[in-house]
Image: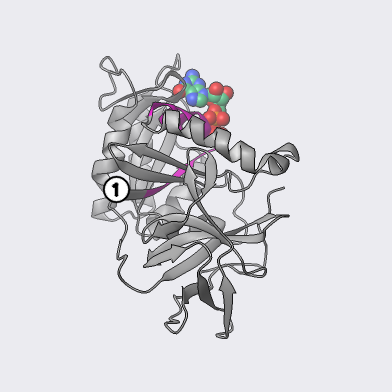
Amino acid sequence: MDIRNIAIIAHVDHGKTTLVDELLKQSEKKNAHEAIQERAMDSNDIERERGITILAKNTAIEYKGVRINILDTPGHADFGGEVERIMKMVDAVVLVVDAYEGSMPQTRFVLKKALESGLKPIVVINKIDRAFARPTEAVNEVFDLFIELEANEAQLDFPIIYASGIKGLASYNKEFDDAVDMKPLLDTIIEYVPAPGQDVQASLQFQPALLDYNEYVGRIGIGKIIRGTIKMNQMVSCVRLDGTIKQFRVQKLFSYIGLDRIEVAEAYAGDIVAIAGLPDIYVGETVCEIGQEEALPILHIDEPTVQMTF
Ligand code: GDP
């Protein structure tokens, strides 16, 4: 399946959550999402009753037959290089900027990380419906920020979408009189964001970039399948940070649909998945096929923090 992996970045309150919710509502998977959510409730009702939500920060939508993985980024201080690690999993970012407030400190912080990672941004000038929205100034501020942060030419050539997340509207024009839905943003994502490498024939490489925890399955590694395929119940090797190898069985393999993680039997290169089975799996290790162990470069992590969501 055709895939796009993006991160959504913004200053706090500029409308990330509302915008992603709206994309979800307007994507083709809406009905399937609801059906799957019900099914997931059946198998995981204890977990849900106890209020344990895991992997809630990832969203996947389907639009024009393309699967779009949307990774949220922390709207606060970056713990342990989490933003950088998210940037490594995606092929572009959507930078959301409030049309009234313009560029703010967090806008600068997250954009800097995205540009340093070599990613091309799509700029969304959001909340166009606000009474004193000033889209032209907001675009100019964003452009100045790109210059200040030494964006390269390709990055500077960013597409701009004007949007009102709350109304579910987007347009290529700041006049906004042609806005009827979010399709201009969805189309821009499909057309502008490069597809990830999808070498499914090669031998497996998967690298957890984020960790999560669930009391039933233990530690969960979230990351991108760099190449190959991974199957539920497969015996695999993990190349540890110290270079040793530990074999384990993939006990759970999760993909994303809507806001939910769902168990899948198999997943392919390019996709972002979560796996359980190695109780002490760690950020930056590499999961490979047995006998074909080849470590990926270790990911940057500032401190040995484990991101846990209970
Ligand atoms: P986040 O912190 O970036 O995830 O922002 P939220 O999506 O939670 O939105 C922050 C606030 O802005 C909330 O009160 C939203 O209702 C409001 N908001 C979000 N999108 C829009 C929009 O398009 N127009 C207006 N006027 N308000 C919005």
Residue ID at (35%, 47%): 146
* Circle 1: residue type: Val
Residue ID at (39%, 53%): 149
Horizontal and vertical percent for residue 164?
41, 22
Q: Which residues are magenta?
A: 5-26
In the rendered image, residue 146 lying in the magenta stretch gets the answer no
Horizontal and vertical percent for residue 3?
33, 50
Q: Is residue 216 left or right of residue 140?
A: right
- In terms of depth relative to the viewer, which is nearer, 53 or 253? 253
Q: Is residue 254 left or right of residue 28?
A: right
Q: Which residue is mark 1?
A: 193
Question: Where 210 sits versus 50, above or below?
Answer: below
Q: Quadrant of residue 280?
A: bottom right
Q: From this viewpoint, which residue is outermost toward the right?
A: 50
Horizontal and vertical percent for residue 230?
44, 64
Question: Where 253 sits versus 17, above or below?
Answer: below
In the rendered image, residue 15 lying in the magenta stretch gets the answer yes
Horizontal and vertical percent for residue 175?
27, 18
Q: Could one spot residue 13 in this view of the protein?
A: no
Q: Quadrant of residue 276?
A: bottom right
